[in-house]
Amino acid sequence: MLSVVARPLGLGASCCRGSRRAIATVISGNKASKLVRERLKEEVEKMKVQFCGFRPSLVVLQVGDRDDSNLYISTKLKAAAEVLHSIMSVNENQTVHGLIVQLPLDTVNHINSELVTNAVSPEKDVDGLSCINAGKLSRGDLNDCFIPCTPNGCLELIRQTGVSVAGKHAVVIGRSKIVGAPMHDLLLWNHATVTTCHSKTPDLPEQVGRADILVVGAGRAEMVRGGWVKEGAVVIDCGINYVPDETRASGKRVVGDVHYASANQRAGFITPVPGGVGPMTVAMLMENTVQSAQRFLLRSQSHG
Ligand code: NAP
Ligand code: LUD
């Protein structure tokens, strides 16, 4: 499934140019996600020819009308029952292969997000957030589940460095259902030794200093300082934080959870924000949707 070929992107920061340290190799999520999308386009084209115009289909359900989501829906859903009803009807719709419920849910209506994500049929849960898919991932059944898109994209970016995961010490900051917890599982079952840190971890800089591979998903602007990072480490920054910036027309700019300017002096490889994990998340959502459509075709063939 993770078929973007891993290849070394060049020398890491562990190599010195004269007396000055080399700067980390930038792992481009923009480039890597483009490759994934190009490959998926070919696969979708093949399905279209082989199965009379068949197309993978994804539904993104938005609850409420948060202006930071890109999808606009005209009717505001007011109760969990309505949301669940919509999910059930998409679950039963044979022309749809993927369903995600955009998070966070509109807080005004206090809908239980656990209830909502678990209502999505596991075969269409291309976000990998239902307890069935999360349980399979935590037990190491990686080929029989949907892996959440952000951690899956992070692993793909790590693979692109050519640095092997097996036997490495990986540190994950964050334990959310969408980023930290599945990232921990994915690294573990790719045979890293994993430490997961969270808001009660008392010695974050020390833990970070032990990481050959560091994945950060804390939602804290530029929290991880360059000085904490182990020399030559692979640094993957999931953070998307908006900070005020008077020099921009928008009055703000996006930064990660890692202080990029200092961390790239010590890391071997580092993802930028923007243009790192974000575009890979979207590419992995497309990958999971195509995979779901392929599984759907296999099931319908075996049922005659
Ligand atoms: P979340 O649900 O708020 O979880 C944040 C996690 O970080 C929690 O486990 C929290 O610990 C931990 N944390 C918070 N402050 C910390 C600190 N000072 N030290 C150590 N750990 C700390 O957030 P999320 O949904 O996982 O998202 C994390 C970040 O990734 C956000 O910036 C989000 O925008 C971004 N994100 C990006 C993508 C993408 O595609 N690029 C996708 C999803 C999310 P506790 O558990 O103890 O509270
Ligand atoms: N809900 C997600 N909510 C928010 N950034 C994403 C995301 C792409 N159910 C569900 O897609 O997986 C999800 N499933 N999430 N997120 C965040 C989270 C969800 C965030 C950023 C991007 C997906 C992205 O493409 C660009 C980048 O990093 O280059 C642009 C960033 C910018 O604002 O400039």
Image (spheres, grey):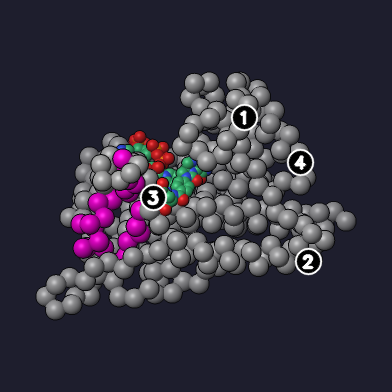
What residue sits right under mark 4 in the picture? Answer: 93
Q: Nearer the viewer, mark 4 or mark 2?
A: 2
Residue 170 is at least partly visible in this image: no
Residue 250 lies in what quarter of the image? Answer: top left
Q: Nearer the viewer, mark 1 or mark 2?
A: 1
Secondary element at image label 2: helix
The residue lying furthest to the front in this view is: 249
Part of the protein shown in magenta: 251-273
Label located before the other in sequence (4 or 2): 2
Residue 127 lies in what quarter of the image? Answer: top right
Q: Nearer the viewer, mark 3 or mark 1?
A: 1
In the image, what residue type sits under mark 3? Cys
What residue sits right under mark 3 in the picture? Answer: 238
Return the x and y of residue 165 as percentages of the image width and height. 40, 64
Q: Are marks 3 and 1 in contact (CB under 8 Å)?
A: no
What residue sits right under mark 1 in the picture? Answer: 74
Q: In the picture, which quadrant includes the C terminus?
A: bottom right
Q: Is residue 226 left or right of residue 234?
A: left
- Residue 128 sits above or below residue 284 on the image: above
The residue lying furthest to the right in this view is: 304
Secondary element at image label 1: loop
Return the x and y of residue 32 as percentages of the image width and height. 47, 65
Residue 300 is at least partly visible in this image: yes
User: Callout 2: 10 Å neighbours few (<14), some, many (20+)?
Assistant: few
Q: CA distance from mark 4 to mark 3?
A: 33 Å
